[in-house]
Amino acid sequence: MRVYSLVSESTKPCAVALGNFDGVHLGHRAVVEAVIGRTGLPTVLTFDPHPREFFGKETGFLLTPGSEKLELIAESGISQVVVAPFGRELAATEAQDFMIQFLSQGLQAQFISVGWNFRFGKGRLGTTEMLQTFAREKGFDIEILAERRLSDARVSSSAIRVALSEGNLPLAHQLLGRPYSLGGEVIPGDQRGRQLGFPTANLRIDPRKFLPANGVYLVKVGEPDAWGLMNIGMRPTFDGLERRVEVHLLNFEGDLYGKSLRVSLQKFLRPERKFAVFEELIAQIRQDKAEALAWIAAL
């Protein structure tokens, strides 16, 4: 899959899946997969930074920042992605001009797929109805994917964030169509886990990445192939001052410093809590480990 920042660099004509696609959840995948087999090269047009980051100056809410989104899009069989830089110029582009510059002239769209609630252009005044009218005028097809719901929950990035913030992994994973994952470089910590008999790998997480509820999770580590216990939180027993992500591998020994780990969240075990003495924390970690191993054995 080829990735471009300018539509002028892309191969044309295109079948274009249009959207922000944060999370690449089941609804997004339907939009992306709709261009496969259509007239034109299967292409995704997306944006970075996310408009919410640009306008609201927010961070830490993305489900799939940067390359993670691109890796998931690539799994759909897309041939190319145009990641348009979202800044003042694009934010000020009128909806009609956007359709002409990016879709008609830029990508020479032969087909467009888009989610039912996608908005674009200056002031977010561009609508799917405008896209339909534009498609008729230019003589190409368009498919507007309807809202998708599972278990009475709307499939959306915001619904997934809510589920993750509540420790509801089954719902989050159902909406995503896969386990939620975190990844980052292993960096030196303060060796607290090692002192307790449970050494941990401290992960440097992209600050744009959304972190689920504080607590202890059973996770599957991709490389090395291992299971682990992950703690997300402030480490209140040690009066921690910053939120950290630490992973204790259950069936691996070795030096991981400087390496990158990606962990997929499998089960939320318990919320984070403060223990009066270290002995209570050690006993709880042992209980967490026993529960994790029993869950793994039952697979």
Image (cartoon, rainbow, N blue to C red):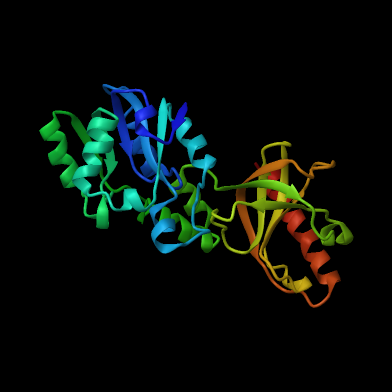
Residue at 54% in and 54% down:
208
Residue at 80% in and 68% down:
281
Judge whether residue 78 can be spotted in this image: no
Residue at 77% in and 74% down:
275
Across and down, in percent, residue 293 comes to 74, 49
Image quarter of residue 39: top left
Left or right side of 63 for 145: left
Across and down, in percent, residue 234 comes to 69, 68
Image quarter of residue 28: top left
* Rendered position, 40 above or below 81: above
Judge whether residue 63 can be spotted in this image: yes
* Rendered position, 196 above or below 114: below
Which residue occupies the foreground of this view, 35 or 177? 35
Which residue occupies the foreground of this view, 31 or 84? 84
Left or right side of 3 for 228: right
Across and down, in percent, residue 85 comes to 41, 44
Give the quarter of the figure containing the C terminus.
Answer: top right
Which residue occupies the foreground of this view, 235 or 110? 110
Which residue occupies the foreground of this view, 266 or 239? 239
Left or right side of 6 for 130: left
